[in-house]
Image (spheres, grey):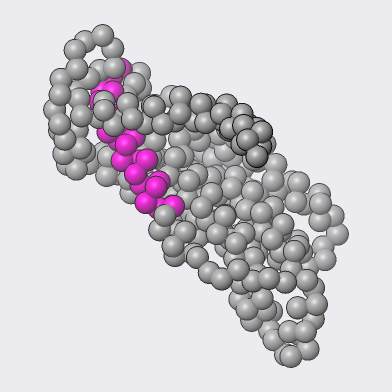
Amino acid sequence: MKVRARMIVLFLLPATVLYLVFFIFPTIWAFYFSFFKWSGFGEAKNFIGLGNYLELMHDSMFWMSFRNTMKILFIGGFITFLVAFILTILINIGIRGKKFFRAMIFMPNVIATIALTTLWAFIYNPKFGLINSLFRFLGFETMEKFLFTSADHVFYAMLVALIWIQVGFMVVLFMAGMDKIPFEFYEAAKIEGATPLQMFFHITVPLMWDVITVGVVLWSIFALKVFEFPYAFHGIDPPPQIYTIGIYLYVMGFGKRNPIYRLGYATAIGVLLLLAVIIVIVLLRKIMQRDLYQY
């Protein structure tokens, strides 16, 4: 028994040390620095207590970033799951080349973020972009020079791209869950006169609820910490209209072209982001908790 206990400790020790060094200790330091006014460099730190947090409560740019993050979480999440479910059902109804379509849909998840932003920059380009070229070909002159990346539309243009990236991952996840459901259940329901919609809500959804829960949690984490794609989407100086909490944290900590270096303030944003992630995940686990069906 002692040998077994030593082996368990031996296997857990490296992961525990890495977790402490790269997550727990930095998190503790982040809480500490969030109570100071500090640039992050050699100058003395000035203790201001809750000053950074109180300033955040009245920071309009922070609240814009927060709203954008919530839009990605809820609007983007709803559309992503809806499209993913539709594609999963279409692929699973017996279409030929199922593995090919699954691989193609998942492809954006294995491509570098900067390559995806470049792709969508070309798609949205007003002169030679794919969408405006299609409008030009179809004769929609009023839409031909539509600026998808203008200040009024850039956020939703970016959201479409984010949804496109994540749909493939959700499709693969849902297909894995749907493949586990015995086909006999659908045959029995069909004999009883159930419609496709009834079978979806009374068979498919309940029997893959654990998979849906995992998908919701993963999407929530992705939405709350999204940074790379929005930051690279509009060049080196992203407009405030596409700021997320992660981007605003980076801007306040390190600046854009002109340095800001408010590391204490940026750390306070990071602490709030961590708390938001914890709260959302705990709430989701409570809301989506259901009895597990055995079959």
Start and end of the magenta stretch?
A: 258-281
Say which of 77 and 240 sits in front.
77
Spot occupied by residue 93 in the image (x, y as percentages of width and height): 78, 68
Where's the C terminus, which quadrant? bottom right
Residue at the spot 20% in from the left edge and 25% down from the top edge: 36
As drawn, 295 above or below 250: below
The image quarter in which residue 260 lies: top left
Residue at the spot 84% in from the left edge and 55% down from the top edge: 97
Numbered label tally: 0
The furthest residue to the top: 42
The furthest residue to the bottom: 192
The furthest residue to the right: 96
Residue at the spot 79% in from the left edge and 81% down from the top edge: 187
Is 171 placed left or right of 248 in the picture?
Answer: right
Is residue 44 among the parts visible in the rendering?
yes
Say which of 15 and 48 sits in front.
15
As drawn, 91 above or below 7: below
